[in-house]
Image: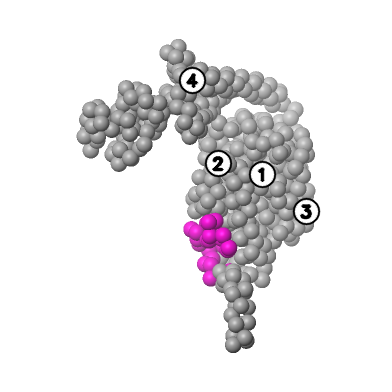
Amino acid sequence: MFLKYLISCILLVYQPCLKAQNDKISLPKGIIIDSVLCIGNSSGSYSLYLPENYDVSIEWPVLLIFDPAARGRFAIEKFVPAGKKFGYILACSNNVRNGNFSKMLDGADIMYDDVNKRFNIDHKRIFTAGFSGGSRLAVGFAINNKEISGVIGCGAGMPNSKFYGPAQMSHLAYFGIVGIKDMNYMEMTDLSRLLTDTGILSYFLVFSGGHEWPSAQNLEFAIGWFELLMMNKGVINKRYDFLNDFILQMIIPAKESEVASDLVSSRKYYAYIIRDFHDSPALPDIFSSFEKIEKSDSYRKSLKENEKNYKKELLKREEFQKAFTDIVTNKELTDSVIKWWKNEIQSLNFKIRGKRKSDSLMAYRLLNMITISSIEYGMNLVSARNYKPASGFFNVWTICEPDKKNSWYNLARAYAFDEQNDKAMIALERSVRNGLNNKELIRNDSAFKFILNDKRFTKLMISIK
């Protein structure tokens, strides 16, 4: 009896270990797995991609990915071409989303611990990547974990905390990617300068989009850059077929910028090649192109123009930020303030459609900033039950997006919570005209409990087909 009892105890102790080992064997390869539950912590899960030739006897590089809305599969899909090409394990949390940064870090730790337990990882090639709030998390998490070698930051820079900065990034390489229309474009530009000044090895790529995940092609390029760095450091063997191909890829943004007369960007991309490639037959020609740009009058003129535009955009951002502060301070928007916002937003829309490219891009970024900021401030204020300033921010949102149902719906909610029933009904009616047709959503929304019996509310519900 005692022997049976002893065997049972041993099996109970080793059961989690056996489960972990079985999980290593049973997970499929070469496809995205939507949800892998974390061992010993079922509240955490992540989407996973294992290379088709994954073998437990070999150490594999890993990329830990963070999406601001915890869209595991969606984010991993962007990296699968790179994962296939370079043989990376890809993991993206299904739980870690924008919010309390400390909790985000805890969630990232849970995923990382599980990936460590399950797989045979090359601890010299662990990288993080993220978009927007996930980008800030990717940096913060990498700073906290010294065995991480690099970060791919997309659409946002450093965490909003004094505890994280370039001084803590000496063990990291940083690849930044941002859309030319992204409201965080200036932030990423500033970060590029800061990392260069502080000696952090970095590469910054600009693409033609807005605040969004970059293309799979751009993300593959980013991981290719990390592969190049690992070869330069002797962490992995040099593959000359890769090196010959990758230098050609690095030339592409330099040439494209040169053709587009963006000599500042072209010089930057050529400088990256000269810095990162220690020996290549193409280097003399690249250095010649670099020097030609640096010595040109057009380049010096472009530098001055860029600096002028930078200061102009910075001043407008500061002006809008002050206007946001005024909304919180003054609680409600007066007619004159609403008129000011309408004029400013109308001016931005006019410039977006204008022929001057630099002004058009600047206006797009500023309008994007106003829209996103209005949404975030408004939502936070509703959560804090501070409804009057919330309605002010949502009013600005409706000016930015007058034809969207969500802007008017959130304005209606803020007014209803504040018991401004007439204004709530007007905003709700506008939301319905703009396409809102979910009766259950409206009826079950606690914001509208005081107007459920209003004749106008009943009539509006009947009108929704």
Q: Which residue, given by chain and number where applicable, does mark 1 sit on? A: 140
Cα–Cα gap, marks 2 and 4:
25 Å
Cα–Cα gap, marks 1 and 2:
14 Å
Q: Callout 3, which amino acid?
A: Lys
> Observer-nearest residue: 258 or 229?
229
Q: Which residue, given by chain and number where applicable, does mark 2 sit on? A: 99
> Which region is colored magenta?
24-51
> Observer-nearest residue: 381 or 289?
381
Instruction: Mark 1 and mark 4 in contact? Answer it, CB < 8 Å.
Output: no
Which mark's residue is nearer the viewer, 1 or 2?
Answer: 2
Q: Residue at x 26, y 28 (%)?
A: 454
Q: Which residue, given by chain and number where applicable, does mark 3 sit on? A: 233
Q: Residues within 10 Å of mark 3 (few under 14, many from 20)?
A: few
Q: Can residue 49 be seen here?
A: no
> Observer-nearest residue: 122 or 461?
461
Whichever of labels 1 and 2 marks the residue nearer the N terminus, that label is: 2
Q: Callout 2, which amino acid?
A: Gly
Q: Which residue, given by chain and number where applicable, does mark 4 sit on? A: 331
Q: Secondary structure at mark 1?
A: helix
Among the 4 quarters of the image, the one containing residue 57: bottom right
> Observer-nearest residue: 158 or 458?
458
Quadrant position of the N terminus in the picture? bottom right
Q: Callout 1, which amino acid?
A: Gly
